[in-house]
Image (cartoon, rainbow, N blue to C red):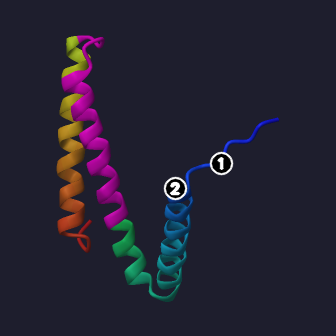
Amino acid sequence: MIEKRSPSWLRVLEILAGVLVLAVAFFVLADSAFALTVLAYTLGIGLIILGLSRIFAGVYGRYFATWFREINAGGGIIAFVLGIVAIITPHNS
């Protein structure tokens, strides 16, 4: 069986991401207020990414029905706005 190796830059990126996750996990265990702030930022970033992907799917999804594209784009706008609110005010989210 032939194995393909992933590129070295991808491996370095995975290691750096793992170190970052470990550092954040340490601080989350040490301080519960920090944990809620990290949760709010993570939720905000996720909602922004989801919102942008739905907006792009609504704009460029030519194979979907028009009503589905409109609902998809509308939901994307709502998710994007909620993500911005979660990042701007993490303590009120």
Q: Which residues are magenta?
A: 41-65
User: Along the line of sight, which residue is nearer the eye, 76 or 18?
Assistant: 18
Helix, strand or loop for the magenta stretch, by majority: helix
Marked residue nearer the N-terminal end (2 or 1):
1
Q: Position of residue 11 (x, y in %)?
A: 57, 59
Which residue is labeled 2 in the image?
A: 10
Q: What residue sits 39% from the left and 67% below the top?
A: 39
Q: Give the amino acid at mark 2.
A: Leu
Is residue 71 visible in the rendered image? The answer is: no
Q: Is residue 92 above or below residue 74?
A: below
| Amino acid at dot 1 | Arg
* Residue tagged 1: 5
* Camera-nearest residue between 21 and 38: 21
Q: Which residue corresponds to the image point at 19% horizontal and 69% vertical from the top-left? A: 89
Above or below, 92 relative to 34: above
Q: Element at badge 1?
A: loop
Residue under the point 48% across and 73% down: 20
The image shows residue 7, relative to residue 69, as above or below, that is below
